[in-house]
Image (cartoon, rainbow, N blue to C red):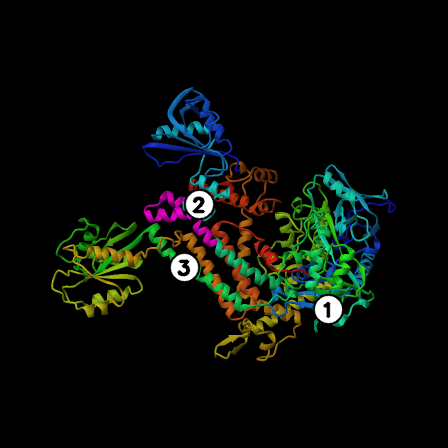
Amino acid sequence: MLEDTIIAISTPPGFGGLGIVRISGKKALAVAGRIFEPKDRSKKPFPVRRPVFGKIRDPERDSALDEAFLTYFKAPRSYTREDVIELSSHGSPAVLEGILRLGTRAGARLAQPGEFTLRAHLSGRLDMIQAEAVNDLIRSVSLSQARISSRQLGGSLSRRIFRLRGKLISLLSRIEAGLEFPEEKLRKDGAADRRALAPIIVDIERLVVSYEAGRAISEGVTLAITGRTNVGKSTLFNALLEEDRAIVTPFPGTTRDFLREKLVIDDIVFHLVDMAGLGRPVHPVEKTGIARGQKIAREADGLLVVLDASRKDSEEDERLIRKYRAKKTIIVLNKTDLPRRIGRRRTQELAGGSPTVGVSALKGRNIDKLRGEIRAVFAPGPGNDEEVVLHARQKDRLQGILEALRRAEGLLSKRHSEEVYAEEIRGALRLIGELTGEVRVDEVLDEIFSRFCVGK
Amino acid sequence: MAHGNEFDIIVVGAGHAGCEAAAAANAMGLRTCLVTIHLETIAQMSCNPAIGGLAKGHLVREIDALGGLMGLLADETGIQFRLLNRSRGGAVQAPRAQCDKAAYRLAMKYRLERMPKLTVFQGIVAEVVVTKGVARGVKTLDGAVIEGKAVILTPGTFLNGKIHIGLQSYPAGRANEPSSVDLAEQLKRLDLKVFRLKTGTPMRLDRNTIEWDSFMPQPGDDDPVPFSYRTRGRLLNKVLCYQGYTNAATHAVIRRNLDKSPLYGGKIKGVGPRYCPSIEDKVVKFPQRARHQFFLEPEGIETAEIYINGLSSSLPYDVQREILGTIPGLDRAKILRPAYGIEYDAVSPMELLATLETRKIRRLYLAGQINGTSGYEEAAAQGLMAGINAALALRIKAPFVLRRDEAYIGVLIDDLISTGVEEPYRLFTSRAEHRLLLRIDNADRRLMKYGRELGLIPESAWEEYEAKRGRIEEATSYLKKNRLKTDSGDSVTFFEYLKKPEIGLKNVLEYGKFPVELSGEESRYIESEAKYEGYIRKQEREVAKAVRTDSMKIPKDVDFQKVSGLTREAVEKFEKRRPATLGEAKKIPGMTPAAVQNLTIFLEIQRKRGASTAHVSRETRPDDE
């Protein structure tokens, strides 16, 4: 257990109906005893996990600050595994800060941001992935993120990674036993090693890929609306948002700078960007707008390329589509309320595999269909029991693990000596340790001794 | 005592640790006294008649590169030599030799007796003389007092040793040799954490009563590879080993008699090594195995004793006979010495500094099995390091500590002092994070410079090493300059070509003539360097980075109480030691990685805060220097 006792306000800043101050550490009970007086004197010592009503008191001035409920979570059955006291009072900042002041005077120390969670991690209650999940849960902006975070807090991702780790340790122990005990004539079996490695690689690949969905959930997806001038990009922008956000005129080049708005479809946040059309600029401002637009299009997670169905397609349309071929794109065929001048075959040709949706932004026709398509194409939703990696840190480690294991696979198939591909597997295990924050050295040896009867 | 003079260093115990310690102290010019229970059993190989193997052979090479004796003597008295893992890469190859036990003992005794600063003395040490927390000498059971300025304890299994055969037991350090009971008691009084370990040894059989045709002969290598860089001349294989198997009948006998095993009967409290299990352990833990392998190894040329490797046991003598009766070829073999289990005291190595000096008693060093290790090689490596560091301390010089990435010796000692032991500790190559860097083909490159600085490597050996390095460099630059066309038509340098797993230096030589002639050893070095090149560079970068982190300064005025997440114990340790760098913090015995991690996070936060609040006057801040 940790030495000092920490205190912090746990509810968001500002006025609220209720505010909670949390105290954690060895002296939590003592600190609370000095600043809280139960109405019913028989409630001291404080009962465990039962709210007690009373007053926050300043012991020096002998005056009451506020009424409050105190709940005592006895170690180790608390969030940090230490003694934890929660004081819930009225939510005014003055009251809450007053409680903090009294608490620090009574022997607690102001917690640093995230320190409660850090303690939970250090006490072994949460591994690193779970600790991150707590943070996510607190900050989650969408329902699906909250759902995933709460599942990861329960350890679902950790468990999955521990299963992978177990499999790797088992594989490595077989290789190492052969290396360390050459006289035991343990069979060298590259084919078996490969068979063991392949499903692990597939599983990690799946996790790495899930980050795409994870990032969409945790950070949102940036979508740029692009196309020639006057194809109706801003009208589409407004139609998707269901408000008149962008100025719309019949004149080409009305939008010169870009506009950015949040669009939420089924829990997923899309950052929709409207920008200048890519025509021949007539004004220097427009020129700058176009340059900016190109940068945004390059950096966006996906594109809505808008074509005017009522005009024949131009070289420019084609060039634009080809330019961003590598990006996820939906071709939006706008102005379908007008007589159509681009044929179906031509549309398909232009789209080159990207999905196409015909809409009339002006009349609001097919906009719901487009929303559905956006959700499906740019944020392929995870299945309900599918694990999703939400963090760049986690994804980077998993990517590193994946690369190491792929190298191991390559070395194996080229018949390199075992100690070389063992090196890659050892590296992958170190990265898993960094991922979950857990480091144990002797596990491979443990496994060797329990599985192989060695001993010369 | 009779010598009438005092010593600088007193080494207690003349096993593999004690001999290396005494020899190093002598070579470094310190007056040394080596006290042993029996002069006849100096450097006795108490268990198997072999030296080396994976990780152990690596250790012997390192001991040799630092100027120790074990490799030289193993070569001199070896009767069969093998390089293990020849079909694998250079990093996991290691030499192993069957030695003539009697010859090894005598060779060591001969050398020690001729060392100018060394006195060998027979006696049982009953007590370390400690004055004001400093070791000042030893007292023997005979009443002799030997004064010294540092004491190195290497008592092996003699420390409170107790032999078990079946349910019989008696105090002994080895069969029929007295154990050191008083010394063990004193260590407890000195507040050192003492715990119990166990190990065992198999029976020795009479060569003339074994039907040898029943077993598979195991010859030595055609081209024996020596341990020592200083060994000259060709090594000769003089004996064969043989391999055989136990069977269902053997296992039935063992199962039927488990109640007579002191281990399974609950008499032995000590923890035994999992990597060297007794035959009863193997049968109990792996019931699905129909048979277990064993080896018949001669204990020497002139003796008839055969060591039966793999059948260590502490079952009663009559059960041992019954076991032999189930194995065709051994059914009429005579037991010359019964197998036995032995329990002994060890001191938690977390009591030690990296120099192997105890933290509680200054100038008291511990090496070998007393630190919880098993194996001749592990003992010798510690003995050498303890001897060197005791000598350096008396000369008031900086301690000699090897890093984990520099040597298996570094891995061994660091593991011991930082994580302690729960079972007899054996070194494995997988314990090294940088296995591809720690090879037998580069032990001289890694360590000989230190051996030379310490005065343990003769100038002639150093000159030979330099010549060898020259040849390797010349050959490597030749390999990097010349190119060949592969079957796929690519042009690659010889060196690149050598990276292919199936290609050796021999294959490359079909394409061109070498400017220098290389020994097998030198070829192996070049092959390793080529095949592991990418990994070597990567590991070197990691090492450099780790060295940088380790050198991160801890401000003198840091308040460890403020570091969140530290246990009281960790805070106390930090406050007591006041480590100057993170590297030193890590090295504090018993310090957990988590505590060091918390400290690192704290320092990083402090540093960032310092940087953000004081960025205006940054250049003038005194603590930035």
Identity, as a three-letter code, of the amino acid under mark 3: Arg
- Label 2, residues with CA under 10 Å away: few <14, some 14-19, many ≥20: many
Question: Which of the 4 image quarters holds residue B575?
Answer: top right
Identity, as a three-letter code, of the amino acid under mark 2: Ala
**B400 with respect to A270 (left or right):** right
> Is A146 part of what is drawn in magenta?
yes
Mark 2, residue position? A131
Q: Which one is in front in this view, the residue at disc 2 or the one at disc 1?
A: 1
Q: Name the chain under label 3.
A: A
Identity, as a three-letter code, of the amino acid under mark 1: Tyr
Residue B14 on image: x %, y %: 78, 53
Q: Main secondary structure of the magenta part?
A: helix
Q: Name the chain under label 2.
A: A
Placement of the C terminus of chain A among the 4 image quadrants = bottom right
Q: Nearer the viewer, residue B312 or B81?
A: B312
From what the image shows, is residue A266 above or below residue A320? above
**A330 with respect to B432 (left or right):** left
Mark 1, residue position? B242
Mark 3, residue position? A206
Q: Name the chain under label 1.
A: B
**B37 with respect to A27 (left or right):** right
Residue B251 on image: x %, y %: 69, 60
From what the image shows, is residue B567 above or below residue B240? above
Q: Earlier in the sequence, mark 2 or mark 3?
A: 2
Observer able to see residue B449: yes
Which residue range is magenta in the image? Answer: A134-161
